[in-house]
Image (tube, helix red, strand yellow):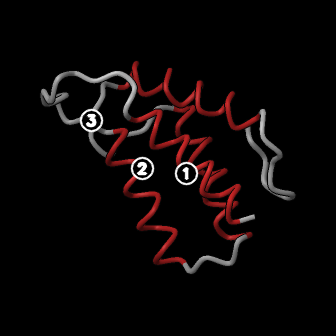
Amino acid sequence: MKKFLIALLSLSLLASCGSSDGGKDNGGDAGKTASACDSYIEYMKCTYKKANMDDATIKTNLDQVKAAWGKVDKAQMENMCKTTIEQAKKAPTVPGCELK
């Protein structure tokens, strides 16, 4: 289970490294998520809870992912999240957690 969660987190972090704007400010998109990203964040939250992570650790991990995603504009973020979700669907899902 831990390997699976690490793999999912790695996928999300790798996706955040995909397209870059060369370090430019994206007009305040940091902290905002696109709809596919919201779905993925909910899935990650569920998997972390199933792994018995405490709420503080879950929040820290998800905040780090959101911060990484905040470095790209919303259109790129939406595409990255859709790609991440499609990749995650190829792996076994965590029972009780739905990946949309």
The answer to the question of whether label 2 and label 3 lie on touching residues, with beta carbons closer than 8 A, is no
58 relative to 100, above or below: below
Q: Which one is in front, 59 or 32? A: 59
**Which badge, 3 or 1, is on the more N-terminal residue?**
1
Which x, y percent locates residue 57? 48, 74
Tell me the SS state at disc 1: helix
Judge the density around disc 2: few (<14), some (14-19), many (≥20) Cα neighbours within 10 Å.
some
72 left or right, relative to 59: left
The answer to the question of whether label 3 and label 1 lie on touching residues, with beta carbons closer than 8 A, is no
Q: Look at the image and tell me in which quarter the N terminus lies.
A: bottom right
- Residue at 85%, 58% (x, y): give it: 96
57 relative to 77, above or below: below
The answer to the question of whether label 1 and label 2 lie on touching residues, with beta carbons closer than 8 A, is yes
Give the residue number, with chain letter if any, for mark 2: 65
Which x, y percent locates residue 5? 65, 58
Amino acid type, mark 2: Val
The image quadrant of residue 25 is top left
The image quadrant of residue 27 is top left
The numbered disc on residue 82 is: none
Labels 3, 1: front one = 1
Judge the density around disc 1: few (<14), some (14-19), many (≥20) Cα neighbours within 10 Å.
some
26 relative to 93, above or below: above
Which x, y percent locates residue 61? 45, 62
The numbered disc on residue 71 is: 3
Q: Look at the image and tell me in which quarter the C terminus lies.
A: top right
Q: Which one is in front, 73 or 5? A: 5
Give the residue number, with chain letter if any, for mark 1: 9
Q: How far apart, in angstroms, are the residues tagged by discs 2 and 3?
A: 10 Å
**Which badge, 2 or 3, is on the more N-terminal residue?**
2
Tell me the SS state at disc 3: loop
Amino acid type, mark 3: Lys
